Image (cartoon, grey):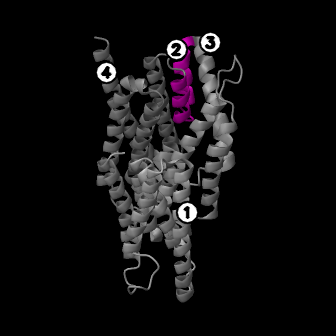
Amino acid sequence: MDLNELASRFAVALGIGLLIGVERGWRQREEEAGGRTAGIRTFSLTGILGGACGALALGLGGGAAGAIVVAAGLAVYAGALVAFARIEARAKQNFSATTTIAGIATFALAACAMLGDLRIAAAAAVAMTALLALREPLHGLVAGIAWPELRSMIVLLAMTFIVLPLIPDRPLTPAIDVNPREVWLIAIVLAAVSFSGYAAVKYFGARHGILLAAAAGGLVSSTAVTLANARHAAQSKGTPRILVAGVALATAISFLRVIAVVAALKPEILWHAAAPLAAATLAAAGIAGLFAFRGRGGEETRIALRNPFQFWPVIGFALFLGVIVLLAQLANRWFGAAGTMVGAAALGLADVDAVTVSLARLVPEALGAREAAFGVLAAVATNTLSKLVIGAGIGGAAFARLVGVLALACYAGAGLVLWLTLSMLDR
């Protein structure tokens, strides 16, 4: 290692100590000098000490001798830091070990800057500083978490890091080309997106207005938002225009969700599906803005979204997703691309995401990207039609008429852009 690189690594080691020391010094800025175990100077010196031990290890050629030098330096430093931190804790009746752990981590990161990857050491130091600086928000977040939400997060982690590696990564049988691992992974991803929508409703005030609640609800299910708003319309809880504006906004977000799922699974489908879906999104957003601007009065409505990441609902969704994938494959095998389109349109009445996932899995082995795009658009079209049926059956005449305007605007926008897209692609 030449002199320039050695100096650069020493500078990063010092910078790590200085960065963390600034946060620790700011945190304890009201205390008198000498009244704390470690501040900006101590942490800066810790960075230099860790860097020096790393440099000595390099001088010894690394290996066992270098490891012993770093370990001995860390042990001496940690012993001195713990001794002073213990005296401070007794004097202040403070039981926090954060500063002690931060000091040990600073030494380790400074040594890593000398011996390992500079980028990893610097990134870890920044992340560590952010965690230290966000003490109050993190404590407030933990205090606001209810047991069902904590349980949901534990289930998510368990299903991702414990169950997922145990699921076979192969088709069930030669005749049933459904990969359980892929189905489980997709179910986890979609459930995590739904949980994000739930968290947005709870922590960012979605209950304060129909539009914000509908926007968050669109991450979970635009059909559920339609059903809830239709019931509110039937009970005269809000004007039909505002309620349908919420439906339109949730519908626009659901279109964007389909685009995101397609982009993540099979980007080549976007060549045929993105433009019509984007047009439908703009149409739905335009209707939402028009109705919200022209709507007057009515009391604020709340959409109650239950926690979508409970264990058995996720299990049921995974099974449902597997069945949808299997049905799409059978329809393609028995009836070809035309049968797949019909099946996608029928199944889209229930769930667009599952149809999108199943069609994406058929590309390119059993289905072309263009046919898959048409299947996705057919599922979106029938799902939009289901909103009109819900509006007519539950929300009343005024609500149903406005939902009909929404559906026609989406159909017209998507149909026109689809025709233009096909015309250009066929030239």
The Cα atoms of the two marked residues, 2 and 3, are separated by: 9 Å
Residue 71: percent from left, percent from top: 55, 59
Number of marks in the rendered image: 4
Residue 284: percent from left, percent from top: 36, 41
Mark 3 or mark 4, which has the lower sequence index? 3
Residue 135: percent from left, percent from top: 47, 69
- Frontmost residue, 84 versus 321: 84
Q: Amino acid at mark 4?
A: Thr
Is the Cβ of the residue at disc 2 closer than 8 Å to that at disc 3? no
Secondary structure, mark 2, is: helix
Q: Is residue 365 above or below residue 184?
A: above
Q: Amino acid at mark 1?
A: Ala
Q: Residue at x 58, y 55 (%)?
A: 306
Which is more foreground, mark 3 or mark 1?
Answer: 1
Rendered image quadrant of residue 168? top right
Secondary structure, mark 4, is: helix
Q: What is the magenta range?
A: 336-361
Q: Residue at x 41, y 79 (%)?
A: 28
Q: Amino acid at mark 3?
A: Trp
Is the Cβ of the residue at disc 2 closer than 8 Å to that at disc 1? no
Residue 214 visible in the picture = no
The quadrant the N terminus occupies is top left
